[in-house]
Amino acid sequence: MPESQPQREPKMSELDEQIANRHKKLAALKDAGVEPYPHRFDHDLEPSGVQQRFAEQSAEELEQAALSLRVPGRVSALRSHGKTSFADLWDGRHKLQLLIRTGELDAASQQVFENLDLGDYLGATGRLMRTRTGELTLAVTHLVLLAKALRPMPEKWHGLADVEIRYRQRYLDLATNPESREVFEARSALVRGMRRFLDDHGFLEVETPMMQLIPGGAAAKPFRTHHNALDLELFLRIAPELYLKRLLVGGMHRVYEINRNFRNEGISTQHNPEFTMMELYWAYADYQDVMKLVEEMISHLAVTVRGSAQLSFRGETIDLTPPWPRLSIREGIARYAELGAAALDDPQALLAELRRRGAELPAIRDYGHLLMALFEAVVEPHLTQPTFVIDHPVEISPLAKQRKDDPRFTERFELYIGGMEMANAFSELNDPALQAQRFEEQMAQRAGGDEEAHSYDRDYVLALEHAMPPAGGMGVGIDRLTMLFCDRASIRDVILFPLMRPVAG
RNA sequence: GACCCGAUAGCUCAAUCGGCAGAGCAACUGACUUUUAAUCAGUGGGUUGUGGGUUCGAGUCCCACUCGGGUCACCA
């Protein structure tokens, strides 16, 4: 009597039981001489390719053609009707239905079929046909196992919804949620389109150091690392800027780089510690030229990647048709804070206005920092449609040229779209003495409590002393641009493996 | 870093006022020769994130912790 057996096995959890079942099938296959993880599979098309190529073929045309195809894919559904079964092969984008008549399979194929589980990779050989409901179907003559899945896949209908698992085990997200895969395909198309656009405009793609002695080119806290052989403290770059501008000195007059930057700061829906930036430098141009270039580039990419210059983002329609409005820092504040012209020039009035609004006060309270703090508090929330915010204060723009008509401000722009800062650009400062002076001012700010003030890079000043041509330069956040293009609220939805805290234990 | 919200079967989700922890898919057994979220009959599967507490009784209330999401701060 089974219930009287004292050594009865303890009950297995559901997951353990499913895994055990799959291991049993794996063992059965091995016993039958089936290789469960073969090295390769000669195939004609994946399911998407079959669907694409034969979409227009009628049942009669397929019957006449009597095409034999070899198609690989992951088994995503299994419908058994006794002697006839249907399986779906999935390639992450489309499925191809298999028709399997168990009586008509050879012995090896029969073994594979009897030990099949959802999630297994399969290679099917058969004749392409349409069922009486019109479904494009491969009538299988031979089956090979390409890889055995030892754990169950997420449920087929709802897919994987748990955001934590989607980020930690992105492969499950990609394997089950087509809309997630589409985001990363769009991201790839975006980067490809950007490279093509820049190449077509005579820009040369280059690579500059990711490990730097002095982390320059931006205001941010760096990650530290160490080179053993040289016993050297190094920093992961926060920006490639100063190296790319050294290339301008070297006569590479149109360069760009698309790669990762690393900033040791908080994580949010718009921030990942490593993120992708496109930076370009363009000799003999200034920030006005760069504005025209970037509005042309982004609107062009929207049309080629998304099919329209009008994008839906967070429930609003964003129109990327150029030209985009230019809004100076002071104009913006005057418009949205309704401060008089006199107050705009008066640090005390700016401080009073910040206090009145209960806004965060900057660590450094000079004119430029106060003006920017007020801008961020009152203007930024309004910047849904593409807007070039221009003419930033010199105190926060140590790498930019000053305006000739008002040296308190620089020839700089930040591009805002959908409330996100998408790009940052300026007419590049190339006067070595002035640059040295700006670095000095940054060091003073650092001493004054701003941990993220720029570092003094003497080697960069040395390069400028050899003459850097006048140039416009720009950085564009690729992740955020992808968020805009794909209407995603979080940067984690456009980065394949966002940084996550490890699970305890 | 602060605050708010969340975590239930492999997956997607229920569970009324604190009163026997459930469904669908998936798994397992069986039926079925054109289904496609196949269908039908049956079976198994839970330390309700972790650790405490209150209570006759906790998925539910309280405290702490872990992880995640969101907002703010910082920043691109």
Image: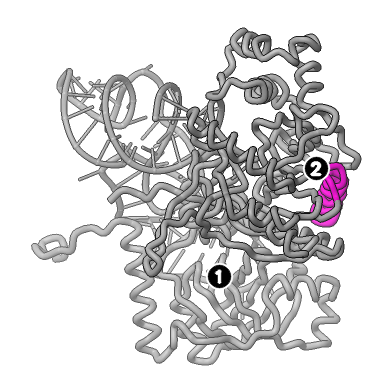
Of labels 2 and 1, the one closer to you: 2
Quadrant in the picture for the N terminus of chain A: bottom left
The spot of residue A228 in percent (x, y) is 37, 66
State how the image is colored.
one colour
Q: Are marks 2 and 1 on the same chain?
A: yes
Q: Distance between the residues labelled 2 and 1?
A: 35 Å
Instruction: Please count the marks in the image.
Output: 2
Tag 2: amino acid: Leu
User: Mark 1 packing: few (<14 Cα in 10 Å), some, or many (20+)?
Assistant: many
Residue A299 falls inside the magenta stretch: yes
The spot of residue A310 in percent (x, y) is 85, 42
Q: Mark 1 points at which residue?
A: A75
Which chain does the residue under circle 2 lie in?
A: A
Q: Which of A241 and A494 is in front in this view?
A: A241
Residue range corresponding to the magenta coloring: A285-310
Image-based side of A121 in relation to A135, left or right: left
Tag 1: amino acid: Val
Dot 1: what SS?
strand
Position of B52 relative to A271 (above/below): above
Quarter assignment of residue A424: top right
Can see residue A356? yes
Residue A302 falls inside the magenta stretch: yes
Specify the principal SS of the magenta part. Answer: helix
Image-based side of B49 in relation to A174, left or right: left
Of the residues under marks 2 and 1, which one precedes in the sequence?
1
Dot 2: what SS?
strand
At horizontal 35% and vertical 66% (from top left) the residue drawn is: A19
User: Mark 2 packing: few (<14 Cα in 10 Å), some, or many (20+)?
Assistant: many
Q: Name the residue under label 2.
A: A311
